[in-house]
Every structure is written in C-alpha cells, then in structure tokens.
Image: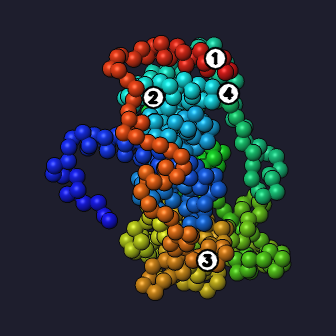
Amino acid sequence: MATDVREVRGDIPLERIEAELTELAGQLAAGECRWLLLVGEYDRREGYKQWGCRSCVQWLSWQCGLDGRSARDKLRVARALEHLPVVTREFGAGKLSYSKVRALTRIATPENEADLVELAEHATAAQVERVVRSYRSARKAAGDRSDAERQHAGRFLRIELDDTPDSDGSYVVSGRISADVAAAILTALEAARALVPRPEADDETGDEESEEGGSAEPLDHGTLNADGLAMMAETWLAHGPASRKGGDRHMVTVYVDANVLADDAPEDCGDGVCEIDGGTRLAPETARRLLCDSSVVWMLQDADGKPVNVSTRTRSIPPSLRRAVHARDQGCDFPGCGERSFTDIHHLRHRAHGGDNSMVNLAELCWHHHRLVHEGSWELRRGRHGHLVAIRPDGTELGTLDGPGFDHRGIGLRNGERGVTVTSTTAIPQWYGDAIDVNWVIDSLWCIDRRAS
C-alpha cells in the first residue's frame, strides 16, 4: 500500500511521531550500510561495464537516481567501509548515521576507528564534522620547511621517449614533484576530469571530503590520472577549456592504407600500413575511430611508395553537418550518457565499409563511448523510432536489468532478518549537551596515528 501524506497527519501523538522518526532513522542507517556494501561489491566487480558506463558513478546516476556529486560521495564511503570493520559494524547496527560515517571515513584508519566510533556515538553529526575538519587541518600543518626543500630539490619528470616503446606502443612516464606543484597539478586534473566524459566527471571542488583526492574517485588512480593528463594536454593545445572540433582535434598524423581500413584482420592486409607518424603501429579499429571525425588527406603513391599526388585536407564531417547532428543529439547519444563535452561524430556504418554522411548514419558520442564502440567491440544501430540501440560484445542488447526479483518488504523486516535490532533510541547520540574538547580529541588521534606509523 502506497504511503499517503494523510497517514501522518491528524491526531497522531507527538511522542509517537518522535519515536517513529528516531527508529526509522536507525533502520535507514542500517539499510544504507547494506546498500553501500553492495555498491562497493558492484564497483569491485565492475558490473557497470556491462551497461557501457564509464564508471560505477555513472551507473549509480543512471540507475539509482543520484546526482553525480552524491554518487561519487557514496562510492567513496563504500570503498572506505571495506577497510573499516568497526565503523561498518556500528553503521550496520543503525547506531551511526550516514552523515557521521561520511565524515569519519575521511580520517578513519584500522588503528583509530574504534576511538572515532566511540566519539561518534557520543556526539552529534555537527560535532563529528568539526573534529574531522580540525584534525585534517592539523595534519596538513604538520609539514616543516626542510621537507619542502627536499621535495623541491628532488623534483623531476621523465618521459622515456628515446627508448623503444612497449609492444603496444605505450611509453613510460615517471617523476617526483613537490607538494605545492602536486596540488596545482591535482587541481588541474580535477578540472580536466570534470570535462572528460568518464568516471569520473568530477565536480568536487570546494567540498571538504574531496581535499585529499583519490578516495572518492570512481576509477583507479593510474587510469584516472592518465586520462586527466591527456585532457590537460588537449586543453592546453586548444588554448582554452574546450575541445577543438572535428579534424582540428586530432593533431597526430596517421598513415593508413585503404585495404587496412576495410579489413579488421591485419594478416589479410598484406603489407598495408596503419601507423602514427614515427612508426608505432595502430590497430585498424583505432584508425577507423580517428577517421570517423578527423581531417583527411588522400595520398597516391607509386610502386616505390613515393607520393605522386596529394589532395588538400578535408574534414570527414562538414561543420554544417556537425552542427545538425549536435542539435539533434544534444551530446553523447549512447544510452544513459548525455555527455556534452569532448564528443566526436561517429559513423554507425563506417565510411571504409560503405557508410555515408547521412544524418541517420551519424551519431554524437563522447570519447569514452566512441572508443567503446570501436576498440571495445560494442555495436550501435538505429531502433524503430530512430533512437540508438547498444549491443554488448556478447550480442545482448543493452536494456533493463534482467535478474531475480527483489523482496521489497519493509526495511525493518529485512534488517531484522539480518539480526539487526533497531529501536527508537538506537540512533540517538549518547550526548548530554556538554561541550566537546576538540583539542583533546585531536591530540588523542595524533598519538594513535603516530603509534600506528
């Protein structure tokens, strides 16, 4: 039976309302703990990939109705709970609210979590937030001048461009930078991730819990920073926080023969060329992705491979057609995406396979989904009403969840089945109204952390 606002109006005694409010707060906390643990497991198994999503954050936004900021925050907490058994136990028992747990996970470690939980159960959420902010400030202020001087003296950035690249054509980048430079780079990376169509479209700036970075990110640090660095380079070359359009974006020269473009199997291409300027070989599908939306120069060669005729540079997608596709799709048209920054125009049937530049054959895709369709073996086709239908590599169509039904009984019953007993006093802090000694708490936490190190 659906809840009606009339059920909670009328002659219900205030004492009953208070008791139900506090009990439901505990039940919701216990239920949310269970939900976050499931989120952490779903993220660990990368279940979002079967939906073509860039990250668990995007899946939560799409399938669970969360905005991006809330999804990132909950994923950060879900990942932290994996390493904090005491916090998880008390949260799952309904004794800690999500607000308290959200704050605690910014400073909690296996060594200090028991003390932090005891504090949280005797304090309000506002007091817990105050302790966390103060302790994080104290940790940041602990650095000394000698450390800064050593960081500056030891700075370097090395890109092994002179060495032979790995078998897949990638290069090794290593370096060491000082804390202030790292902060500037991380800030730029966060700004780049806010525009890159992936997991991590972040907008965490100004949020207390995002200051230390990393823990709230929807992908592993290495992958996320590599994509952010690529975005920074792209934005710098474009002289502003916007992508260059079409052929102007791809500044890398690619040499590719027509027979390679038309055939996926390199062994069927004879001596066909498919490489970037410098000799690093590309997969044919990568070349097709770049050719979807780039400038093209046709070159005629003689028997010795020397150019005898070269065309002028033309764009594979004329600007007027690009504007028309963007006006229709209004961003990435891959199901569940909608990203509007850094997009390409994709040919559903590639030009190398006989596709044309008709509107029905074109779709606007973000960089992530454009790569997913080409190198990731996904397929796109038009549905009966003109919308895009995504086909996974295993041939199944991207659609609704197809799994066993979920028992939608009351959250209290489900908590009880897991052995969680929640009453009207479970979630109420054991606080007597006295002032909290923040300095004493910080000193205690500092001692715990020093012993652990």
**Residue 350 appears in the picture as rendered:** yes
Tag 2 secondary structure: helix
Residue nearest the observer in this picture, 88 or 245: 88
Q: Earlier in the sequence, mark 2 or mark 3?
A: 2
Tag 1 secondary structure: helix
Mark 2 vs mark 4, foreground winner is 2
Can you say whether 192 is above or below 324 in the image? above
Estimate the x, y position of residue 12 in percent, counting from the top left.
Answer: 20, 48
Hey, which quadrant is residue 86 in on the image?
top right
Q: CA distance from mark 2 to mark 1?
A: 24 Å
Amino acid bearing label 3: Thr
Amino acid bearing label 1: Arg
Amino acid bearing label 2: Glu
Residue drawn where x is 64% and y is 84% of the image = 353
Tag 3 secondary structure: loop
The local crowd at label 3, few if under 14, some if 14 to 19, many if 20 or more residues have their Cα within 10 Å, is few
- In-image side of 27 versus 18 (left or right): right
Tag 4 secondary structure: loop
Residue nearest the observer in this picture, 355 or 104: 104
Give the label on residue 155, or none. 4
Can you say whether 1 is above or below 379 in the image? above
Amino acid bearing label 4: Arg
Estimate the x, y position of residue 179 in percent, counting from the top left.
Answer: 59, 26
Residue denoted by label 3: 396
Q: Earlier in the sequence, mark 3 or mark 4?
A: 4
Q: CA distance from mark 3 to mark 1?
A: 53 Å
Give the label on residue 450, or none. 1
Give the label on residue 121, or none. 2
